[in-house]
Image (cartoon, rainbow, N blue to C red):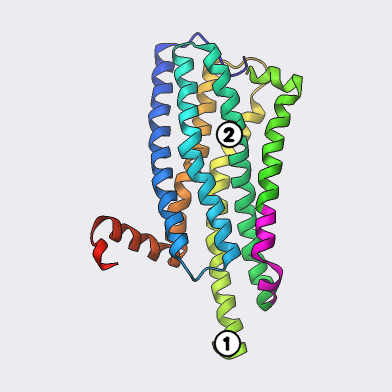
Amino acid sequence: QLRCTGGWTDEEYKALIGISVISVFLAFNAILGNTLILVALHKETVLYQPSKFLYRCLATTDLCAGLILEPVATVYRFSLIHEDWKLCRYAVTTRFMVGFPLFSVSLFTVTAISVDRLLALLLGLRYKHVVTLKRTYVFVIIIWVVATVTANSYFVNPQNQMQVNEPQQPGQQVSLNMMRYRKAVYSALWVQVALVLCFLPYSITTVNLTTEKLSTFDLIVLECVVTLVKLNSTLNPFLYCWKISEVRQEVKATIRQALCCPSEV
């Protein structure tokens, strides 16, 4: 019963409803933004395929966070407001089973993007021989399997389960590649910074909260930092468009095609 607590005041109910409204708004933007990014990445032909695949993976997890996780979170808050504790327990379990793999994969993917850009900067011409699409596929599959197994194993442990019931000259080519890779490294760094800023409050809050039954105030604080985590799924598409010119151009073309002049594209 850790996250299913009664005794809410009117002010706390209003705060919970306000958090829900903000969270739904962020989820809508995450769905729209990441859908545009996936369409743009499908059309884009300049980015190296392993790098593009990592961006696709991150956009997909962000899309699922808005499309799947937010409805579950809404059900959870609804169960708190109406004190439906059976529904609350199911929502908490489902939220963890869905949210833990999604955010774990998102975290590892952002890390992989940063490492990928660093390798591109350090390895130079050897980069494409070391970082291949096949190896990238294997990496993504592994992190999905590890995240999913970890989430399931949490509930297998009875102790944890009780808590849940809570073409140019070679020299010129290398120079141009280095400039482009440096730019890509800086772009990945912005994504990493956004992730840290959004996840750090959640990490600090969960560490400081005790394993005892949480108060209503604790739950409101927890919902606030969880909403901040979801903000990361909304920010990433804007960062792609801001820092990656190829993606920005394709997003603009997609929007123009959808809204203004489909016959011209």
**Can you say which quadrant of the picture contains the N terminus?**
top right
> Dot 1, crowdedness within 10 Å: few (<14), some or many (≥20)?
few
Residue 231 painted magenta: no
- Which percent across, then down, holds residue 141? 67, 50
Which kind of residue does numbered mark 1 sit on?
A: Gln
Closer-to-camera residue (121/27): 27
| Residue type, mark 2 in image | Val
Most extreme residue toward the top, as rendered?
A: 7
Which mark is on residue 104?
none
Above or below, 102 relative to 241: above
**For numbered disc 1, what is the local secondary structure?**
helix
Q: Are marks 2 and 1 in contact (CB under 8 Å)?
A: no
Residue drawn at x 57%, y 53% as measured from the top left: 192
Circle 1 is placed at which residue position? 172
Depth order, front residue of 57/246: 57
Q: Is residue 227 visible?
A: no
Q: Main secondary structure of the magenta part?
A: helix
Looking at the image, residue 75 sits to the left or right of residue 98; the answer is left
- Asked if residue 127 lies in the magenta stretch, the reply is yes
Q: Which residues are magenta?
A: 126-139
Vertical relation: 31 (above or below) 11:
below
**Quarter holding residue 169:** bottom right
Q: Residue at x 52, y 16 (%)?
A: 87
Residue 113 in view, yes or no: yes
Whether 165 is drawn above or below 130: the answer is: above
Q: Check disc 2 and report its element: helix, strand or loop.
A: helix
Q: Which residue is mark 2?
A: 98
Depth check, mark 2 against mark 1: the one in front is: 2
How far is the residue under mark 2 from the one under mark 1? 48 Å
Q: Height in image: 206 above or below 122?
A: above
